[in-house]
Every structure is written in C-alpha cells, then in structure tokens.
Image: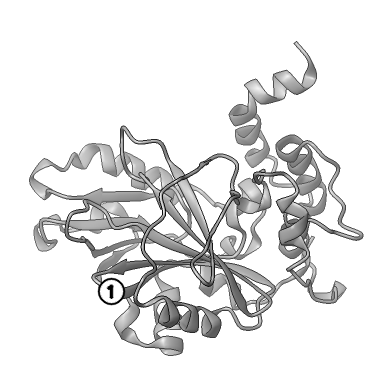
C-alpha cells in the first residue's frame, strides 16, 4: 500500500496522535496537518486559496475577542448586544460539570452542549427516554478535551469548558429545523448553505449553496457532503437575515454564522471562525481558489503571533 493510501486508511488515528503532540509549534503542526488532509504543501508566505488563508488566519489573526465568539455561552450576550435579545435561543442552565445538572428542573425537551467544542451535543426529545449514563460519558469526555490542540484553532484554547442547556427549538412538520449557514467575507455575506438530513439516521447528508439572492449554486463548500437537488423557497426573512449577518461579521476577514429559521423567526446558532478548520475539499476543487480570492487577510503583525 502507498503512503497516501496508508494515510487515508488511518486518518482518524493520525489525527488522534497529532492531538497529543501539543508541544509542536502551531506553524509546523498546521503544515503537517494540511499536507495530510488536503494533500498539498501549505503556502503561508503568499496564501491564495480559501483553505490556505484559513490556516494563515489561525496563526496571525489574534483578536482576543475571538475567544468570546467561539464560546457557545459567552457569545450569546455578545450577539444580543449587537442585534437584540429576540434572536437568542433561551438558555435553561449552565454548569461546570455534568454532576451539577438537575434533570428534574429541565423540561421534557431540551438541548445540551459543551461551550468549547463541536462534539458535545445532546438533543433530548423525550426526557423519560434519556440515557443519563450514556450522555454523562459523552459530556464528561468532551469537557476534558481542549479543541485547540486538534486543529490549532487558537480561540478555543482559553475557553472555559462548561455545559449549557438550551430550549429545544422545533418547527412544525420537522423534528429538528434546518440551519442556515451564512458565509461572510470582508464584512459581507456571500453564500448561504442549507444542510439536509443533518440529524437523520437514514437520509444522506447533503447541502445546497445559495447566493444572497437565493439562487442555487452548483458547487459544494465541503466535499464531504453531496450537492443536493433540493431547492427551498426563498425565506421571507432573508433580507433580515443578511442584515444581521452584516452587523455581526464586521471587522472579520471571513466567518460563518449559523441560524435557524422557525416560522419565519430567526434564531442565532453559533459563530464558526474556521469552517471545517479550512481543511475541506470543495466541489469542484477550483472553488477553493475562487472563494479564497474573496477573502482579504490583514497585514501580519508579528507581535500578535503566538506560534
């Protein structure tokens, strides 16, 4: 078997090993990771593609405010101050450890998530059927993880791990409402991605990419998902969605902001500074360069570089 074949077959094992190599400087680590995932040499001197610019931003764009943006609890106040409390999903509780949760005080339906990673998520549709032992194991394991060391997304490094419970947001006719992921570049929304079958056990996860006029685009921003042929009606609140995205993305070279639209009401989901950690393969591949041209990276300030 070729080296490339071995890497592909054992990719997840390699990622776990790399997460343990926390003493490797970020710049070197990202070059290794990029080579494994993307299969190309990382150009940090003159980044051109979207994936290269994401790695550059991890290393050199060190706005301290970003730690708040990736904290799923602290970001709520930040967003509410910017666009209003009505867009925020109500928080039912926040705890430092799983044992502090009093499930008797939670409603029959709710969502649990960790504040500092992307894996600690539990959707409870019926509290009477909740497997407490199983979710304790999942949430406790997530609390021990420092997401920064896996992909070197530095804003996560100093997020205090907590568990939060949120109101379960349902939409008529759907078990879980679809989310709308708005990709913004240089202070402007550019694309809206809608995932389909995100939490379905049987359906294939796919995505439809729209431009800001709600015209479907025949490409994928993440090659892990197929390009869907589903075209949804233009949301009645699309202009409102784009307006609040414009407010939230100011001063950031690129960012993805996620929302739910439920009965024409917009609810903030989360802010993602490095979509897929900049390691996704787009379809077609040339979109990596095309999207990259939309992102203007700031002038490097070596005094703010923590590598």
Residue at point 48%, 84% (across, down): 243
Q: x and y percent of residue 16 in the render?
A: 60, 34
Residue matched to label 1: 264
**Does residue 58 lie above or below 121 as drawn?**
below
Q: Is residue 159 left or right of residue 100?
A: right
Crowding near pointer 1: few (<14 within 10 Å), some, many (20+)? few
Q: x and y percent of residue 71 in the render?
A: 47, 67
Q: x and y percent of residue 81 in the render?
A: 42, 89
Q: Is residue 294 left or right of residue 211?
A: right
Query: Closer to the camera, 216 or 99?
Result: 216
Residue at point 64%, 49% (across, down): 151
**Does residue 239 lie above or below 209 as drawn?**
below
Q: Is residue 84 left or right of residue 263?
A: right
Q: Quadrant of the N terminus?
A: top right
- Specify whether residue 243 is in view: yes
**Does residue 285 lie above or below 165 as drawn?**
above
Residue at point 39%, 48% (across, down): 196
Residue at point 64%, 29% (across, down): 11
């Amino acid at each position: 078997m070729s080296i490339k074949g071995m890497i592909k077959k054992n990719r997840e094992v390699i990622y776990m090993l790399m997460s343990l190599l926390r003493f490797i400087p970020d710049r070197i680590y990202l070059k290794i990771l990029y080579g494994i995932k993307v299969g190309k040499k990382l150009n940090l001197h003159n980044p051109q593609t979207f994936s290269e610019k994401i790695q550059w931003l991890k290393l050199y764009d060190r706005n301290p405010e970003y730690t708040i943006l990736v904290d799923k609890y602290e970001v709520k106040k930040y967003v509410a101050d910017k666009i209003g409390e009505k867009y925020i999903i109500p928080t039912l509780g926040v705890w430092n450890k799983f044992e502090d949760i009093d499930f008797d005080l939670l409603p029959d339906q709710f969502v649990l998530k960790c504040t500092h990673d992307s894996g600690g998520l539990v959707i409870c549709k019926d509290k009477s059927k909740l497997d407490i032992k199983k979710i304790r194991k999942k949430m406790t394991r997530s609390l021990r993880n420092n997401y920064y060391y896996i992909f070197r997304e530095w804003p996560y490094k100093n997020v205090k791990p907590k568990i939060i419970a949120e109101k379960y947001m349902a939409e008529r006719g759907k078990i879980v409402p679809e989310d709308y992921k708005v990709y913004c570049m240089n202070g402007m929304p550019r694309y809206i991605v809608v995932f389909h079958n995100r939490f379905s056990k049987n359906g294939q996860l796919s995505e439809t990419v729209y431009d800001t006029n709600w015209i479907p685009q025949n490409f994928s921003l993440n090659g892990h998902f197929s390009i869907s042929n589903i075209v949804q009606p233009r949301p009645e609140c699309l202009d409102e969605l784009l307006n609040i995205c414009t407010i939230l993305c100011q001063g950031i070279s690129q960012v993805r902001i996620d929302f739910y639209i439920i009965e024409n009401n917009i609810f903030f989901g989360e802010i993602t500074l490095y979509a897929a950690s900049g390691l996704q393969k787009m379809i077609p591949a040339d979109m990596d360069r095309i999207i990259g041209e939309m992102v203007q990276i700031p002038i490097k300030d070596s005094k703010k570089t923590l590598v």
